[in-house]
Amino acid sequence: MHGQLLPGKDFTGQGRGVNHDDEGHGTSMAMIIAGRRSGDGPWGLAPGSKILPVKSIDGNWAVNMAKSIHYAADQGAKVINISQGGSVSEGNKAVLQPAVDYANKKGSLVFSSTGNDGDRGNAPTYPASLPGVVGIGAVDKALKVAEFSTHGPQVALAAPGVRIPTRCTTELRRCIEDGTSDATAIASASAALIWSAHPDWTNNQVLRVMMETAGKPEDGKVPSKYLGYGIVRPRKVLLDKEGDPGPAEVNPLVVAHSTAEPPDAPQSAATKGTTGAPQKPSSRVEDGSDSTAWPVIAGIVAAAGVVVTGGLVIARRRRASR
């Protein structure tokens, strides 16, 4: 990450500085987005990106997160990655929604993890559940929804979030992680790649082509409460030149939600197994690709992004193995 970090800001009041990462979560997300391979380590998806680090989790998390979003937008961050989440309440909404609206008006795209509680109560979180935020769910290598991925109408897109290689401590060197946090970092990196190839597009246009080119569920019905409008596929835009950016000032997610049918009910979105547990829908891409390897597109100078470090229990990643 040498040479890729911008100054950033610490809103926690702890006095340790923005580059002090207590648990490594924010650093891991930054590596997934913009890491440059060292030795035999993994590449980030958008290694040409600049990272604006922001710390917000401490004390009143919603207030600090709102300040962080506002600050990132003022610094010109094109992509705001929030790999974390907190409790849904009217008070938190009143604090966070104006910041999200401000960032969108300033031209930023705000991505947030939906959470890892899909198999343990499926509690929604903020900011992923707020209008104007692109909520990201997680899929595995079979392109099926991860059991832990929190689902519902807040899911706008999905991305790989199972067995993702990322940063570890110096003793362990390397980790494999599961989580919607990791999926959100991949979605954010995808947006940065697309924006770097089309710098004249607005946030709405970048999001529109991501939605259009996403890999849809097998039944083709969108939005899905598990996948939203599909699995991100930046190669469809970058290499296959697909996707119509459309109008610059129209938010495609707002329009899509206003015209779409309600998200699939459990009976239509998933078939029941013999145990009675819902089986998450398959979501293979429509172009016949059957590869289960995670795609990596590197070497494109990407747009500036922001990583908000830290994470609450509800939306933190799951470490699969070390």
Image (cartoon, grey):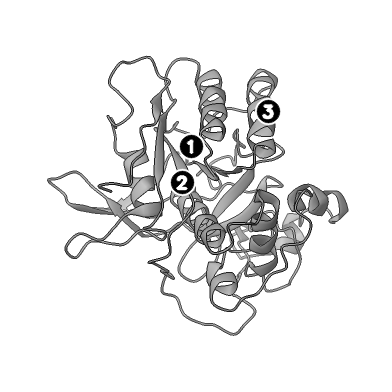
Q: Which mark is residue 149?
A: none
Decide which of tag 1 and tag 2 comes sooner along the chain: 1
Residue at screen point 31% across, 53% down: 166
Amino acid at pointer 2: Ser
Residue at screen point 54% across, 77% down: 239
What's the CA distance linking mark 3 and mark 2? 20 Å
What's the CA distance linking mark 1 and mark 2? 6 Å
Which residue does the numbered mark 3 point to in the structure image?
97
Q: Is residue 50 toward the left or the right of residue 131 in the image? A: left
Decide which of tag 3 and tag 2 comes sooner along the chain: 3
Residue reaching furthest to the bottom: 288
Residue reaching furthest to the left: 171
Decide which of tag 1 and tag 3 comes sooner along the chain: 1
Q: Which mark is residue 84?
A: 1
Q: Which mark is residue 181?
A: 2
The quadrant in which residue 217 appears is bottom right
Q: Residues within 10 Å of mark 2 (few under 14, many from 20)?
A: many
Residue 266 horizontal/vertical position (percent): 72, 56
- Residue 130 lies, with reference to residue 13, above or below; the image says below
Amino acid at pointer 3: Gln
